[in-house]
Image: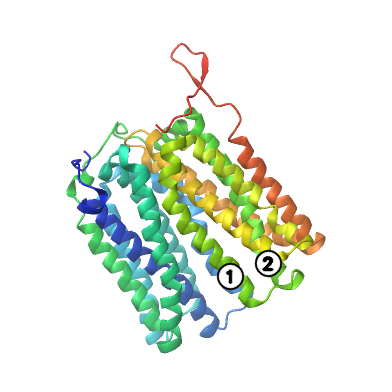
Amino acid sequence: MAVPPDGRPLRRHRPFVLLCAEQTAGSVGRQITALALTLLAVTVLDAGPFAASVILALTYLPGAVLSPFAGVLVDRVPLRRLLVIATVLQALVVGSVPLAQATGDITWPHLYSVAVVSGSLTFTLNLGLQAALPRVVGRERLLAANSVLTGARTVGQVGGPALGGVLVGLTGTGLALTVGSAAYAVEALVLFALPTALDTPVGQRDPSGTSPTAALRTGLDVVRRERRLLRMVLAGAGLNLGSGASAALYVLYASRELRLSAWQLGMTYAAFSGATVLGIVVAGRFGTSLGLWRTTRICGLVAGAAGFLVPAASAGPAFAILLAYQISYGLAVTVWAISLTTLQQQITPAGLQGRVAGFNQAALLVTVPVGALGGGAVAAALGNVPVLVAAAAVALVSGVTLWAPVRAHSQAGVEAPLADQAQ
């Protein structure tokens, strides 16, 4: 059963407003926690570069490995209850760190365990919220809803690190992690206020006794059958592979080879943030006027092509070219992500949202560290510019694949072109 629809604007739609509040609170909690955990490892446990990077890797690894199975869980259990329990556990897990620090019992195994469990809970929540949104707002308002939620999440991503840095600077990592835990507790309260109708099963349920593996295959069959879904998953993985390699080298390349000053480097990141905000504003207009599938293809192509501006900066006015890169890439990838998520939610049958989102999330997450580690290793031997060119080529080819003809099986068993529409 879905949340009963109504004609109110989204800003007056109580369940949706709750989801916006959840996105902001959860984003703040995650940003503070990520910063404070790393600083705690460096300042208290005297972590070196490798140990600090392991914490980040362990945060992402569960999402890359477990997302499809978390998607099965999302589709099979009462959704609202799962969201609340996962967020409460998140608050407790993060809160255990300042408690251990206060008693002098903080250890590496504890810190690594927190990174793994917190990452698992975060990516499970992401899948649960993607499955919940179509039931809260209805499929016809998904594009506008995803745009607004991206904006709410961006507020936390911008303000969270700043707040975390101030807290650590003034009071140390303990209080910062306590505030991060409190943000998760607020998130849990917000999720608890969602309609209980979200706990009611929707769509076609798996037969009683179906194994998790069989349920997983059901979701994979949807991705294989819906060619646009498969194409988006593969293209997204390729884009992340290329951008992961580029991002890993960006600061080193810009500061050492291009001789950009710290303020210039900071301005390029600020340009990306501004482009992200612009993308949030215009995503709905692009999706409505061009259709979601066409918008996804155009933005995938632009995001891939923008990567060539990074190595091109070595041959021209570096600061201006990198500004152009961050603006074009930030705008394209933001609209792409909103359009892709909306189209995925609209295509996926009810009752399978978690599994389909899980496969997509796993593909997107696993390629970022692979691209970053691979790009760094190859750049050590060949130099930054060749790797940056290769990374841009991978991203562009991934965007180009979205433009190949997409065909679906008709009822008669004959393949027919899919219409370029927003459904």
Compared with residue 104, is residue 134 higher up or lower down, i.e. above or below?
above
- Cα–Cα gap, marks 2 and 1: 9 Å
> Residue 154, located in which quarter of the rendered image?
bottom left
Label disc, if present, on residue 319 of the rendered structure: 2
Q: In the rendering, at what x and y percent does residue 218 appear?
A: 41, 33
Identify the residue shown where x is 37% and y is 43%. Answer: 143
Q: Which residue is mark 1?
A: 267
Q: In the rendering, at what x and y percent does residue 83 appear?
A: 29, 55
Q: Is residue 281 visible?
A: yes
Compared with residue 198, is residue 140 higher up or lower down, i.e. above or below?
above
**Residue 132 relative to residue 123: left or right:** left
Pointer 2 local density, CA inside 10 Å: few below 14, some 14–19, many at least 20: many
> Residue 85, located in which quarter of the rendered image?
bottom left
Viewport quadrant of the N terminus: top left
**Badge 2 amino acid:** Phe
Label disc, if present, on residue 421 of the rendered structure: none
Residue with the most extreme top position:
412
> Residue 26, located in which quarter of the rendered image?
bottom left
Pointer 1 local density, CA inside 10 Å: few below 14, some 14–19, many at least 20: some
Q: Between disc 2 and disc 1, whose residue precedes?
A: 1
**Badge 1 amino acid:** Met
Q: In the rendering, at what x and y percent does residue 307 appear?
A: 66, 53
Viewport quadrant of the C terminus: top left
Q: In the rendering, at what x and y percent does residue 391 appear?
A: 69, 52
Q: Nearer the viewer, residue 298 or 58?
A: 298
Kind of element beneath mark 2 = helix
Are discs 2 and 1 less than 8 Å apart at CB?
yes
Q: Nearer the viewer, residue 34 or 396?
A: 396
